[in-house]
Structure formats: C-alpha cells, structure tokens
Image: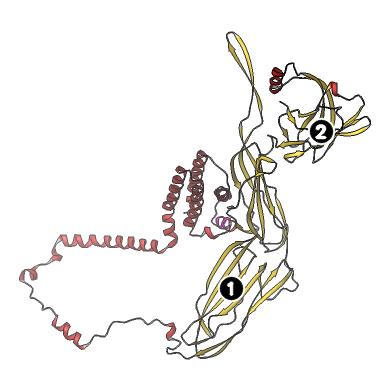
C-alpha cells in the first residue's frame, strides 16, 4: 500500500495543475531505502521541461530517479464522487520515483524540496516534504544511554551518570535490567529513579523517552577506568512475515496470504564509558590532608569553656561536602591528655541536593577535666582538594582556653559508680530477729531408726541423678553459649525471616503490587545474606558487598547472580515498566532457588 503525502506547490503557472506526492510503501524505516513518488497526469506534463531534481536534507541521501507511465485508478472517495458527478476519474500519469535512503534518526523529518526546470526557469514543486521515519523492526525497540557528567576527573572527585531510555513503535514492554553493575573502581550512591517519567517524543507520538540521574560515583584510583555496559531485556514486535494458507472447499483449492508479526525477546545495552582519572597534585599538598576531594565546609566548637571538676564538656565537629558519597575522614585531634574522654559519637548522612550528593558528618567528643586549672586546647584544622579551583583548601577552628574550677565531688568520684553493699543491721533489727527464731523440735523415734542409704532404691536414684545432672548442665551451657553468640542467633533466624519476606512477596503478587513485590525480594535477599554471615550488607556499597562475599569464598557465579538480582529489583521497583504475573512468579522461584544455594554459608 502506498502512502499519499501532502504537497505544497509553489509553481507560478497552472502548467502543472495537479501533481501529487506519495511513498512507495506504508512504512519508512530508519537507515533503509524507500521511494518518494511524484505523480503527474500525462496531459499536464509540460513540453518545454528540463531536469527534475530533489535537494535532500536532514540526513536523507539520493541515489537515482526512475519514471514510468501508469493508469491511476480512483479510490473509494473518487468512486463516490464519480457516482454522483458522472464519469470515471481514472487517468494516465507518469510516476517519477526518487530513490532515497532514510537517516538513522527517527521522527517526522523534512526530506527536502523538489524542483523542475520549465521553460528554462527552475521552479519549486514542493518546498517541504515531511516523512515519518520509524525504527526498523530488525532494529532495537529500546535504546538505552548512560551519560557521565564528566569524563575527566580527579581521584576521589564526585560525578554522576544519567540513565536514558527511548522506546520505539515496535516496543511491547517487559523491560528488565539484567546487569547494572558500575564496576569495582568506584564508590557509588544510587538514585531510586523516582524522577524517571516516560513522555511522548515531539514529532513522534508512538515513541517515548525518559531520563534521570541514576548514580553518583567517585573513583578509588587514578588512571583510565571503565564503567561496563548496563544490560536489559525486553519484548518487541518482530518483523512482518507473509504467511500463505491453503484450504480445500468443495473440491477447489484456495490460497490466502496474510501478514503476521509475532512478539520476540530482545536485549540491549549501553556502550562502555571510559573515564580518565587524574592523580591529585603533589604541589601545595598540606601535611594534614584529609584525603577528601570536593567542596567542603568545616566547623568545630565546645559547648562550654568554663566548668568544674566532674562536669563534662562536648566538642562538636561538623564536616560536609560533595566528595566521595557516604565517606568523610576525621580531622586530626589535638592531645587531650589533661582530660579523661569516652569514645566519641559519630553520625553520617547523605542527601541529594541539586546535581550532587552531599555527605555530612558530625563528631561529638566528650571530655572530663582531671583537675582544677586553666588549659589551652590547640586549634583543629581540616584540609581538602577542591577540583573546581584545582587547589588545596583548609579551614581551622580554635584554639580554646578552658577554665576548670574545683567542684563538690572529686575528679575520681566523677568516674566511679559506687556499688551499694548490704545494709547495716541495726540493734533493734537484731532483737526482732531473736524473737522470730523457731525452736528445734525433738526427732521422733521412727525418724531416728530410718536408714535411707540402706535402701536399693536410694542408690538407684542417687547414681541415675549424676548423668542426668551432667546432661542438663551441658544443655544449659550450650544454650547459653548459643544465645550469647549474636552470629549464631542471627543464623538460626535467617530461614524464618526469609520465609516471612517470601510470604510478603506472595501477598504483593496476589494484590498485583509490583513495587511491594520487588521491594520484598530485594530486602529479603539482603537481609538473608546479613543474617547468614552476621555482616550488615544493607549499609555497604555494591563493590564492598562483592568483596565480602569473595572473602566468604562464595563462587563468582553466585556473586554475579546476587548482583544482577539486586540491580533488577532496584530498577523494576522505580522504573515505569511492567512485568506479567507469570514473570513475577518465575522471578520469585528464581530468588528462592538462589537463597537455597546460599545455605552453605551457614
């Protein structure tokens, strides 16, 4: 079937009264050949005509021009008009076919203009020919891109990657991530993809696109590093196939032809990204360099500088910056030998602010003066490398002059917790106890004559109690040892807690709640690993998790399977893609099988 195109004629004369444009096929595919046809009735072809040309643009290429004469038969609308207006509208026309090749890009694209030399003058037949270029059925129905904000950075500097999707007309759904590993050379903070929203592509309503910041990374070493391809699978509409069917009816054979398109599974991936990582400059590097790379803020101060012996003062240090996500080193603290101290309290937080991940750390140091006097605590400094300014920067706080007065309690008393002993027995209490003494009664004669040790039953019970005592003692000791070992307790509960997660996934599956289903699978797998190994995988980066599993001698295939499943769950939870109920049931079965294989970690 041919497609008729609108024509914008700018011919100054009526010599060519009714030219028309059409395509030689229903669908123009990107990167493929097609024919653009100019149809001119024979009686309207000018005598004094010259060269007919097309001036292609926007990536279209021209390879030749053919012409043929043909009888144009009316369509339904023409027959309707002919019936009421009288006469047939069939006519002879010359069809000029411009052989073109479509560009790789898709959308509603202007081919260019057609000109014809008439009476020695070049005239425009059509100055704007829009053609809807679509993806070929043999091409990917989804293209996935991964774009870094920077390709040349310093070691430890933060950058982000944007994940983009573009779906085409023959995309049918079922988009799933099979591998979204960023490699082992980066510390990564991943986004939840909540901002990923698919929208129609302008000029191509059957195409959709979406993009969002996927992760923030910081290289752990210098050199030429790579982010491996992200891999996905999906379902697309296959290439049209002509199917012939033969039928026998009343002794006669009939053959019918139809065009069918079947759904096929396909895969796509992002290209490998090369990142050049420069080492930090040696020139101007401070002696107390913290190792942080980015733009940082530093402050430190005491809650009080005047106190008494026995009181505590708190040094609060705040550091924040856009360097390695989730990591901030401590400053070098001065000598606190004039004070007693307890282990400091640390808290660290991450948040996305604009296009960066800001990591904040607060340190609280508690100090108790040992004696009365005046003390000077030296200044505290913190330094970092600022890649935007390409230089090292520092911030300082202090020094502090501390005045300690003598308090009511001694310094030693402030650090001792007296243990309460037994209360002193007063004289009156002794008298009360004396009146409460019970008199000793005489033992009767039968009791004096009884001899239990001469009974056989006595010795049987006596000797049987000894092994029973040791058995009970061993059981109690074993249980106490088990309960005192947090790792053993967690391992004992691992399977029970995993079954609860799988039950939650089954419940979400029945309610067709995809997000809850994949959330249950993801947390179930991470918690199961944590309970089996007594390691907190939930707070680890993916590279740290893989390293810990390698240390536990888990096979490389199993580690890859765990990594792929976590990527898949994270992507499907937040990306607006669908998976069928049957696919989710198979996913649940696969995760259950994976967890069974992890049982040897026990």
Query: For residue 521: magenta?
Result: no
Q: Quadrant of residue 476?
A: bottom left
Residue 84 in the image, given as x and y percentages of width and height:
69, 18
Closer-to-camera residue (199/336): 199
Checking the image for residue 19, the label placed there is none
Q: Which of the marked residues, 1 or 2, is nearer the chain's N terminus? A: 2
For residue 594, side relative to residue 281 (left or right) = left
Q: Is residue 453 positioned above or below 114 on the image?
A: below
**Residue farthest to the left, as pictured:** 445
Q: Is residue 283 above or below residue 116?
A: below
For the residues marked 1 and 2, what is the alpha-carbon distance in whole angstroms? 72 Å
Quarter where residue 85 is shown: top right
User: Within 10 Å of the Cα at label 2, are there few (<14), some (14-19), or many (20+) other Cα atoms?
Assistant: some
Per the rendering, the mark at residue 9 is 2
What residue is shown at x 51% (from left), y 54% (from top)?
526
Q: Nearer the viewer, residue 308 or 354?
A: 354
Of circles 1 and 2, the one toward us is 2
Percent x, y of residue 559: 57, 51
On the picture, is 58 further left or further right than 382? right
Q: Position of residue 196 (x, y in %)?
A: 61, 50
**Along the line of sight, which residue is nearer the eye, 274 or 349?**
349
For disc 1, the marked residue is: 318
CB within 8 Å, label 1 to label 2 = no
Name the dominant secondary structure of the magenta segment.
Answer: helix
**Residue 130 at x, y = what percent?**
76, 37
Q: How many marks?
A: 2
Q: Residues within 10 Å of mark 1 (few under 14, many from 20)?
A: some
Q: Which residues are magenta?
A: 545-560
- Give SS at disc 2: loop
What secondary structure is found at the residue carrying circle 1?
A: strand
When the figure is inspected, residue 171 is found, relative to residue 368, above or below; the finding is above
């Amino acid at each position: 079937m041919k497609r008729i195109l609108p024509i914008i004629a700018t011919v100054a004369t009526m010599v060519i009264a009714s030219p028309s444009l059409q395509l030689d096929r229903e669908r123009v595919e990107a990167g493929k050949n097609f024919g653009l046809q100019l149809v001119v009735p024979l009686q309207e072809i000018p005598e004094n005509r010259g060269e007919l040309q097309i001036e292609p643009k926007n990536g279209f290429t021209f390879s030749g021009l053919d012409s043929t004469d043909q009888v144009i038969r009316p369509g339904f609308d023409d027959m309707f008009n002919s019936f009421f207006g009288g006469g047939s509208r069939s006519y002879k026309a010359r069809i000029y076919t411009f052989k073109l090749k479509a560009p790789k890009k898709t959308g509603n694209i202007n081919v260019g203009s057609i000109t014809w030399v008439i009476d020695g003058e070049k005239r425009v037949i059509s100055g704007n020919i829009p053609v809807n270029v679509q993806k070929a059925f043999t091409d990917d129905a989804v293209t996935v891109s991964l774009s870094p904000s920077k390709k040349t950075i310093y070691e430890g500097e933060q950058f982000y990657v944007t994940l983009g999707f573009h779906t085409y007309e023959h995309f049918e759904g079922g988009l799933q991530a099979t591998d979204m590993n960023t490699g082992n050379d980066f510390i990564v903070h991943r986004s939840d993809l909540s901002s990923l929203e698919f929208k129609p592509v302008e000029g191509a309503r059957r195409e959709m696109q979406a993009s969002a910041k996927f992760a923030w990374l910081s290289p752990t070493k210098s050199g030429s590093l790579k982010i491996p391809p992200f891999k996905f699978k999906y379902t697309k509409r296959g290439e049209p196939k002509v199917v012939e069917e033969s039928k026998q009816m009343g002794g006669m054979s009939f053959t019918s032809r139809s065009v069918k398109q079947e759904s096929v599974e396909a895969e796509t991936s992002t290209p490998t990204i090369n990142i050049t990582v420069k080492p930090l400059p040696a020139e101007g590097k401070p002696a107390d360099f913290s190792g942080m790379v980015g733009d940082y803020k530093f402050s430190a101060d005491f809650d009080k500088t005047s106190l008494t012996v026995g009181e505590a003062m708190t040094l609060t240090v705040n550091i924040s910056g856009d360097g390695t996500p989730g990591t901030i080193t401590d400053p070098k603290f001065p000598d606190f030998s004039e004070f007693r101290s307890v282990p400091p309290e640390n808290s660290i937080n991450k948040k996305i602010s604009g296009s960066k991940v800001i990591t904040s750390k607060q340190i609280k140091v508690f100090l108790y003066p040992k004696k009365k006097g005046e003390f000077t605590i030296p200044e505290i400094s913190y330094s970092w490398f600022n890649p935007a300014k390409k230089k090292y920067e520092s911030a300082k706080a202090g020094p502090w002059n501390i005045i300690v007065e003598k308090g009511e309690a001694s310094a030693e008393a402030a650090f001792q917790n007296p243990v309460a002993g037994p209360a002193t027995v007063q004289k009156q209490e002794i008298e009360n106890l004396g009146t409460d003494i019970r008199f000793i009664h005489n033992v009767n004669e039968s009791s004096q004559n009884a001899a239990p040790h001469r009974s056989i039953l006595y010795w049987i019970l006596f000797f049987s109690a000894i092994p029973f005592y040791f058995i009970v003692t061993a059981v109690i000791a074993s249980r106490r040892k088990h309960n005192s070992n947090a790792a053993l307790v967690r391992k004992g509960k691992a399977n029970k807690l995993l079954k609860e997660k799988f039950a939650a996934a089954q419940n979400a599956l029945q309610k067709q709640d995809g997000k809850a289903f994949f959330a249950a699978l993801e947390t179930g797998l991470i918690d199961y690993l944590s309970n089996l190994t007594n390691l907190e995988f939930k707070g680890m980066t993916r590279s740290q998790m893989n390293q810990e599993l390698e240390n536990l001698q888990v096979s490389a295939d199993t580690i890859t399977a765990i990594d792929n499943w976590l990527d898949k769950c994270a992507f499907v939870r937040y990306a607006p893609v669908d998976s069928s109920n049957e696919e989710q049931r198979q996913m649940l079965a696969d995760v259950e099988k994976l967890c069974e294989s992890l049982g040897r970690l026990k």
